[in-house]
Each structure stands twice: as C-alpha cells, then as structure tokens.
Image: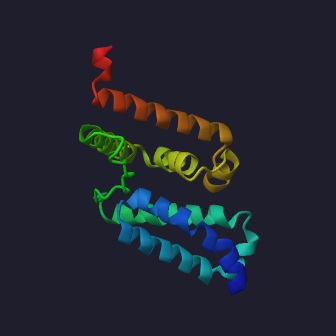
Amino acid sequence: MDLQAFKQRILPVQGRLFRLAQLFLRNREEAEDTLQDVLLRLWTNRQQLDTYHSIEALAVQMTKNICLDKLKAHARQKTTNGPDLPDVQTNDVSPYQRVEFADSAGLMYRLIDDLPDQQKFILHLRDVEEYSFDEIEQVTGLSINNIRVILSRARQRLRDNYLKTNDYEAGH
C-alpha cells in the first residue's frame, strides 16, 4: 500500500478512532498519543493491510486494545475529563435548567464510564459512531444477536442506574 492509498483508506477514520480512544482514556493527550500509535502501527504494517477484510475494523480493534493496555498500565486510574458538554443557548434556557442539563450529562458520562468495557465499547460504536450491526460484527467478531443483547443490556443498565441515581423510582 502506497502513501496515497493509505491516506485514502486510513485518514478518513481518524476522527472515529480518536473519539473511541477518548471514550476509553478520558484524556485528550492520551487519546491523541493512542491515535498516533495506531497510525504508526498501520503504516509500519501497510504491506499486509490488503489481506484484511476491513482495515477500519482492524484500526478500531487496535485502538481499543491499545486503550485497554494503557488503562491496565495506569491501574485503571482514569482522569475525569469527560467530553465537552453541548452548549445550551442562554436565550431559551434558565440558569437552573442549564445546571440541570450539565448535571444530567455529567451523570450519564459517569454511568457510561461504569459500564463493563465490552458494553461501553459496543454502545459507543452503535450510538456515538453510528456503526451498523454488520460493521460492529466485523470489528468485534461477535454475532449480531450477541451484539444486540450486549447493547440492550448496556442501555437497560444505564436507564436503571440513571433512574436510581435520580430517585425517580421512589416517587413512582
């Protein structure tokens, strides 16, 4: 694979790889380092890339593995730098509502962070990166039915923990 083919096939997925790394590592600098590491490894092995069915699936799997290795090396001490919260227009929302939105978003990030790695990974691929079930199957090697079950359990766990944390269940 020459430089031009590498640029055409690898560079378009950089954003997805970076967001995935940031999901796991919760640190922009470490996510950037991970992305550079993945790109370097892909470039180093560029002659073998044509043997893979999906280079994007390979890159996603490499990113996930490097992130998990880094987390293990850091004894799972993650930083609390969550993704930037969406800006809320001040015209339509009161300060109280803005604080409540930020609190809810922060809670969701913490709850997602508490999911088992496999659930977090599949939830991210499906709901954030908008991968199809076929693409997730290529990346993970899991069957589509298994992916659906894991995704359903992740969403249910998020819902239950969100409701429990906000004491909604006690009021109903």
Colour setup of the view: rainbow
Tell me where residue 65 appears, x and y as whole percent.
Answer: 49, 63
Quadrant in the picture for residue 74 = bottom left
- The quadrant of the picture occupied by the C terminus is top left
Residue 54 image-quadrant placement: bottom right
Q: What is the x, y in percent for residue 23?
A: 43, 56
Measured along the vertical axis of the image, is residue 38 above or below residue 68?
Answer: below
Farthest residue to the top: give it. Answer: 172
Residue depicted at 36% across the width and 61% down the height: 72
Front residue of 6/57: it is 6
The answer to whether 98 appears left or right of 31 in the picture is: left
In which quarter of the view is residue 1 placed?
A: bottom right
Is 140 drawn above or below residue 72 in the view shown?
Answer: above
Furthest-bottom residue in this view:
3
For the point 60% across and 76% down, the residue is 42
170 on left or right of 68: left
Residue at (42, 64) in percent of width and height: 69
Residue nearer the viewer, 161 or 116:
161
Residue beneath the point at 35% across and 27% down: 163
